[in-house]
Image: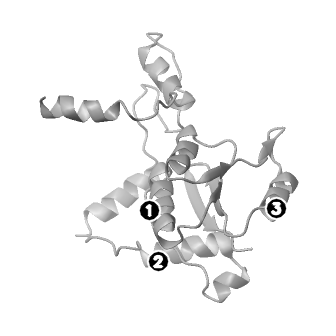
Amino acid sequence: MSPPAAAFSLLHRAPYMHPDAIFALTTKYLADEHTQKILLGQGAYSDGEGRPWILPSVQLAEEIVQGSGHEYLPIAGLKAFRTRALDLVFHGVQALDEDRIASCQAPLGSGSLYMAGSALKIISPDLRDVIITTPSWPSHKLQFQTMGYDVIEPPYYKDKRFDFQAYLAALESANPGSVVTFMLVHITLLAVILL
């Protein structure tokens, strides 16, 4: 058996995952021949021609990085970025003031969830519950289930609004040591509740 065929024979054991609705929408968009189509997919900006439109701030950041002779970041990521991100999310929280919140920089979305879920399994193999926001990307639930976590999807969004009371009630009833993820547009924050 050739190497590609051998690799494929391993993949047949993988569970089927239904296509993500957002990416399926992009597939339909690409197949549509209408000249005035609009992509309502995963939230990336496009110009009138359908080409990626890069925010001017991102272009400037790319120019700065390209001209900086940059090195690899430390394993935990850029300290200044992590410090500012923690302050943005946990400003005024006693645990931050007491230096009891750890952080690391990771790829966005699915990549960060996979890294965090894997690391937490090694650090605390007894962690069982992962609370994810609803709505979330379908792959997020599957990722955590594949790692052996029980995924809990509490009320989060109702009548086009964040249902704070229902979400707070779900967090208050969570098992001690539950892993909680927060989805903020394209930014994923991960926290471990220690009740």
For image coordinates 44% across by 51% down, the residue present is 56
Q: Nearer the viewer, residue 28 or 52?
A: 28
Residue positioned most to the right: 165
Horizontal relation, residue 59 to residue 168: left or right: left
For image coordinates 14% across by 34% down, the residue present is 3
Q: Nearer the viewer, residue 118 or 6?
A: 6
Query: Residue 47, position in %: x, y?
Result: 45, 32
Q: Nearer the viewer, mark 3 or mark 2?
A: 3
Query: Residue 79, position in %: x, y?
Result: 44, 78
**Label 1 element class:** loop
Residue positioned most to the left: 2
Query: Which mark identifies residue 46?
Result: none
Q: Nearer the viewer, residue 67 or 159?
A: 159
**Label 2 element class:** helix
Look at label 1 and name its amino acid.
Ala
Vertical side of 162 occupied by 77: above or below: below
For image coordinates 26% across by 70% down, the residue present is 70
Nearest to N terminus: mark 2 or mark 1:
2
Query: Which mark identifies residue 80?
Result: 2
Task: Work out how far the residue at label 3 is from the one at label 1, CA to CA, in angstroms.
Answer: 29 Å
Task: Work out how far the residue at label 2 is from the one at label 1, CA to CA, in angstroms.
Answer: 14 Å
Vertical side of 129 occupied by 44: above or below: above
* Residue assigned mark 3: 173
Q: Are dots 3 and 2 in contact, CB under 8 Å? A: no
* Residue assigned mark 1: 106
Task: Work out how far the residue at label 3 is from the one at label 2, CA to CA, in angstroms.
Answer: 35 Å
Look at label 2 and name its amino acid.
Ala
